[in-house]
Image: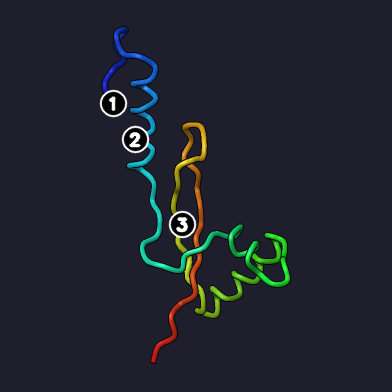
Amino acid sequence: MSRPTSSQSDSEWAEAFRTAISQTCRKPDGKGWKTLRELCEISDPPVSTRTMSVRIQGLIKAGRVERFDGTEPPPSGTRINRQTWYRVVPKKK
């Protein structure tokens, strides 16, 4: 990034940071990816994030679920959030 100058406004800096954050985020490609929180919300019966995490780790070890570690833009602020997504591995025919 270039050095700040006294003529640049705060809104220009804010826009520059938003652009930089959106360009550095890594999300999974394809369909079917869910975060841990999303999986807890759709499970029936509802389970805690700890319980879901333990179940997912077992499914990953069994080769039935894959994991993607990435980042996503924050809902507010300037920090990028780490996020993990999961999806069911398609069955081979």
Query: Percent from the top left, x then y, of residue 80?
Result: 46, 40
SS assignment at label 3: strand
Q: Amino acid at mark 2?
A: Ala
Name the residue located 55 percent from the left edge and 76 percent from the top edge. 61
Foreground mark, 2 or 3? 2
The disc, 1 or 2, on the residue closer to the chain's N-terminal end is 1
In the displayed structure, would residue 66 be above or below residue 11? below
Question: The C terminus is located in which quarter?
Answer: bottom left
SS assignment at label 1: loop
The disc, 1 or 3, on the residue closer to the chain's N-terminal end is 1
Q: Looking at the image, which residue sits at the far left?
A: 2
In the displayed structure, would residue 21 be above or below residue 56? above
In the displayed structure, would residue 29 be above or below residue 72? below
Query: Percent from the top left, x then y, of residue 89?
Result: 46, 77
Report the disc number at residue 69: 3
Q: Nearer the viewer, residue 70 or 12?
A: 12
Location of mark 2 (residue): 20
From the viewer's perspective, tell me whether residue 54 is left or right of residue 30: right
From the viewer's perspective, tell me whether residue 56 is left or right of residue 83: right
CA separation, marks 2 and 3? 19 Å
Report the disc number at residue 1: 1
SS assignment at label 2: helix
Q: Residues within 10 Å of mark 1 (few under 14, many from 20)?
A: few
Q: Amino acid at mark 3?
A: Asp
